Amino acid sequence: MSRTPSLLPFATIVVAVAVIALPVSPSSAAEKPEPSAAPAALGAESAPEQADAPDAQTAEPVISQMEAGQSVTIGERQVSVKEVDIVPLVDSKYSRRFTFDSYENPKLSLLRKQEKLDEVVAEGKDEFDRQVLLLDWAYRRFKKFGRPSSQARGALDILEAIDQGHTFYCSHYADVLVSASASMGWINRPLALRLGNHLTAPGGGSTEHAITEIWSNQHRKWIMFDPTYAMYVEKDGTPLSAWEIRREWFADEGKSLTFVLGAERKKVTRKDMPLVLAVHPGFGELALGTRTMDKYAFLGYIPNNNLMDAGLDYAKMFIVRDKLTEGVAWHKRDNPEDPAVDPYFPMQQAALTVTPATSISKASGGEGPGEAGAEALTMQVKAETLTPNFLTWRYRLDGGEWVDGELNQWALRPGTNSLEMRAVNRFGVAGPASRIVLEVK
């Protein structure tokens, strides 16, 4: 897997646990750790090479690629896969073009401290609840909606201008939420929307809108957040991405959708539109209506969130276009071949590769439960991730305590063995856990 030269280099550290360090702002380049051995280029992947070895009979089985119910004989032991739940690593021309803000950026820590964001999210019961509280904060932090009366860009400057009485548009709401999320260690990205050739109802007003998508470790997916309305959207209780909303809205005008507003999680439906949220002097009613949702025809993914330093990288933006956008002039950029998949690469995962390291041997108090001297199978563990500001791995064996650090080998004992692993960033935010359960007989 090659990397574009414009980004900081990616590398796989040649140890049992491999780390892929995502590009961040240039200020963090100096902090990239030096591996003890020369790192291999990401294109020289060990796992695919094992899978493609010429002699399939001598190649070690990749246990983590097997399905539940499958078994393999290793030495004199039978290893059965009981459960495999691994968030995959996806490398594509879309994942590679993203640049993320750095933990070392002093503007992030200042924003978090100045706005008391830890207090803002303190009452959240879980990660997604805290993210929704931050969404609600961004909405309420703005006082006047309308034509911008200030040239401020970047969260800190915008917030200062708000306190001076200035007026702002939806794109400024999105800027503030994206950077506020980054200051908390959450990955959020800006999106630009535009009307296509389909209007649910006649009307006037702006043809464009700005939203964000936040990566939810809890839900293991990208979720649309609209700070202009303090809104996310559900179907059957599951929060949706911008693409999922688009698909449902234009399929049946959103009859299957629930629009969730604010920290109080007020739920409304298509039949409640237009819903007036506020009245702003000089602008009028700020209302959630069908025209707002019709703007999901064009989806423009802006591939950076270091907005307080770099601004929006429109040059590398990629845009979903199809029959809903035909005949409508807008920016011309790359169009994802599979818009349901290409923009939606997972983040902060622990993509595990588990292979036999040895045949049956005597355990000597290695990493794993059980008594020393018991017969054991030793598994080699490799983990990869796309985690901005990566700090460490966090794992646990057999449902025990979580441990921070590298798990080089996994010693299996007769019976049921489980491994869970997560990536942790420098903000202390842990990604979704990957899990594999094996039974040894």
Image (tube, grey):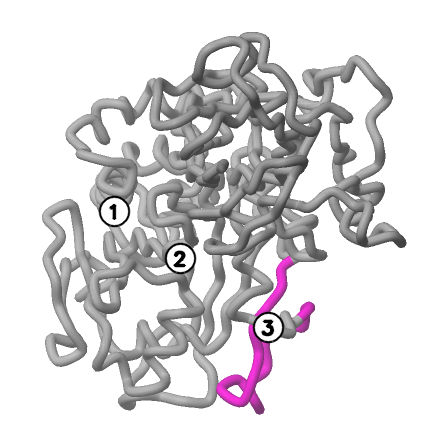
Task: Tell me the residue that label 2 is attached to.
Answer: 211
Q: Is residue 165 visible?
A: no
For the residues labelled 2 and 3, the Cα–Cα distance comes to 21 Å
Amino acid found under the numbered disc labelled 1: Tyr
Residue at 67%, 22% in the rendered image: 27
For the residues labelled 1 and 3, the Cα–Cα distance comes to 32 Å
Rendered image: mark on residue 338: 3
Residue 147, quarter of the rendered image: bottom left
Rendered image: mark on residue 37: none
Q: Is residue 91 visible?
A: yes
Check disc 2: other Cα within 10 Å, few if <14, some if 14-19, many if 20+: many
Q: Earlier in the sequence, mark 2 or mark 1?
A: 1
Position of residue 35 measured from the top left corner of the image (x, y, whole percent): 77, 17
Q: Is residue 88 left or right of residue 148?
A: right
Q: Is residue 66 left or right of residue 368?
A: right
Position of residue 163 measured from the top left corner of the image (x, y, whole percent): 28, 33
**In this picture, which residue range is highlighted in magenta?**
317-334
